[in-house]
Image (cartoon, rainbow, N blue to C red):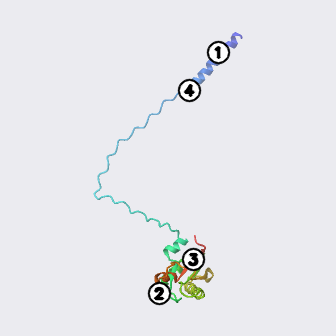
């Protein structure tokens, strides 16, 4: 290698070293901002602190759901022995059912008429059908569309209480409103 080539290589190496050192040069570290002086705690209020009222707790029942209907309205009314006339104590429940159904017009229902175990199967099927029809007629009179209501009689075939006492029979003389479609 000639003298000029050696010199050029040395100069190049020195230049690379200088550039490397310049690239690695550190900048001064930033100084942290001074912390403000602590503020003294506020003076005690003249009246004790009262927290704001807690928001109402959601019941977990979705409006328009089957659970909403059962819990907040009621899905069953009861009848006297061998009767299918809607009793006075059943009218508020059926009126509430009608209001709920009118609020949720997509919901369809089935009214299931039931009887206690006394009497023949045929008699109780007919009695259950008349009970279901009485509830249907009441709801229609309250503005619920007849097209949304179907009825069925189970007679004595689906007792709520299998007992053979007057209390058990009273539970089994009922009309149950079951939601079949359209609930949330």
Residue 167 in the image: state x and y as whole percent.
Answer: 46, 82
Kindly report the distance in space between the C-alpha atoms of the residues bearing marks 2 and 1.
Answer: 113 Å
Give the residue pinned by disc 1: 10
Give the residue pinned by disc 3: 178
Residue in the image at 62% along x and 20% along y: 15
Instruction: State whether residue 143 is above or below residue 39.
Output: below
Q: Residues within 10 Å of mark 4 (few under 14, many from 20)?
A: few
Give the residue pinned by disc 4: 24
Residue in the image at 29% along x and 55% along y: 45
Kindly report the distance in space between the C-alpha atoms of the residues bearing marks 2 and 3.
Answer: 21 Å
Give the residue pinned by disc 2: 88
Disc 3 is placed on an element classified as: strand
Q: 37 left or right of 88?
A: left
Mark 4 in CB contact with mark 1 (< 8 angstroms): no
Kindly report the distance in space between the C-alpha atoms of the residues bearing marks 4 and 2.
Answer: 94 Å
Residue in the image at 29% along x and 53% along y: 44
Instruction: State whether residue 74 is above or below residue 34.
Output: below
Nearer-N-terminus badge (3/1) = 1
Tell me the mark number nearer the camera, choosing from 2 and 1.
2
Nearer-N-terminus badge (4/1) = 1
């Amino acid at each position: 290698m000639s003298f000029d080539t050696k010199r050029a290589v040395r100069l190049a190496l020195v230049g690379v070293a200088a550039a490397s050192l310049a690239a690695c040069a550190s900048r001064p570290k930033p100084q942290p901002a001074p912390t403000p002086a602590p503020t003294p705690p506020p003076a005690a209020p003249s009246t004790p602190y009262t927290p704001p009222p807690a928001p109402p707790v959601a019941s977990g029942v979705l409006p328009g759901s089957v659970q909403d209907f059962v819990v907040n309205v009621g899905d069953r009314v009861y009848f006297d022995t061998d009767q299918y006339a809607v009793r006075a104590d059943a009218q508020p429940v059926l009126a509430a059912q009608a209001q709920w159904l009118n609020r949720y017009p997509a919901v369809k229902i089935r009214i299931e008429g039931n009887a206690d175990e006394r009497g023949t199967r045929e008699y109780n099927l007919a009695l259950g059908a008349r009970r279901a029809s009485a509830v249907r007629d009441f709801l229609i009179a309250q503005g619920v569309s007849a097209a949304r209501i179907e009825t069925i009689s189970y007679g004595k075939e689906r007792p709520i209480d299998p007992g053979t006492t007057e209390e058990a029979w009273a539970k089994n003389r009922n009309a149950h409103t079951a939601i079949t479609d359209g609930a949330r």
